[in-house]
Image (cartoon, helix red, strand yellow):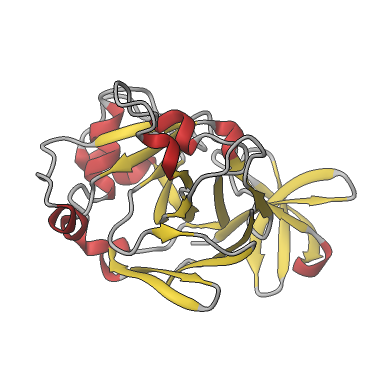
Amino acid sequence: MAKWVRFTKNGSTGFGTLEGEAIAVHQGDMFAGATPTGESLALSAVTLEAPSVPTKIIALWNNFHGLAAKLNVAEPAEPLYLLKATTSVAAPGSIVHRPPAYSGKTVYEGELGIVIGKTASNISEDEAAAHIFGYTIVNDITAADILNKDPTFPQWARAKGFDEYGPFGPWIETAFEPASASVRTILNGAERQNYPLADMIFPPHQLVALLSQDMTLNPGDLIACGTSVGVGSMKDPSNEIDIAIDGIGVLKNIFVQ
């Protein structure tokens, strides 16, 4: 049971577990056989990076009963998802920039993230827990005006794949029970989202099992579980966006136009 972080210090990247305001540095593989080095670093002395390096980011659409009802769309019989570019990853605390070539609306989407810890292929729901390393927080930022710009082809990958449009972190929490927690999104000090994770159509263990039947999930891969009601645009020149999940923490970023 730990909070796992990745960090940069003096140009070198490392990882370890968060213990109060200090990081117990580890060596080896975060997901298989990590061992403490005995070194401790003050959290204030490092820069936190995204807590894993995923080979793929799977982002869910229409995975909450509440949002499906608000949008008046049918609940899916199986997970609906897209692949978000790994180059969209941004660190917790970083500044996210709207691309110069895009002048349209950009929206926040506060979400729970699942981080895979063990290779999963065609596993059952009962086996899923052993393949989940832990949970994190995701802001699935979206260039909303691009999504349906071409009426012949919804541009999910482009709308969600811009550089920096996928911050997650600030760490991976290995002791977390999603069913009892909620996601809160605060934009410039005002709460915009507050929804229960128990409202998921496909909860984490079922989701991991079903996705593993489509493609192999690798250690470090990130599954963004989808968002619910309250999604909105970031309109100010500079926007402070905090996504909080009790039991994990707060993902903080700034989005600038």
Q: From the viewer's perspective, is residue 55 above or below residue 173?
A: above
Residue 131: % across, % down: 37, 40
141 and 225: which is toward the camera:
141
Residue 161: % across, % down: 52, 34
Residue 128: % across, % down: 29, 41
Q: Is residue 135 left or right of residue 91?
A: left
Q: How many marks?
A: 0
Residue 250 in sight: no
Q: Residue at x 46, y 45 (%)?
A: 142
Q: Residue at x 62, y 48 (%)?
A: 50
Q: From the viewer's perspective, is residue 237 above or below residue 210?
A: below
Q: Residue at x 71, y 73 (%)?
A: 21
Residue ranking furthest to the right:
10
130 and 70: which is toward the camera:
70
Residue 215 in sight: yes
Q: From the viewer's perspective, is residue 82 above or below residue 165?
A: above
Image quadrant where residue 112 sits: bottom left
Q: Residue at x 23, y 33 (%)?
A: 210
Image quadrant where residue 39 sits: bottom right
Q: From the viewer's perspective, is residue 255 above or below residue 204?
A: below
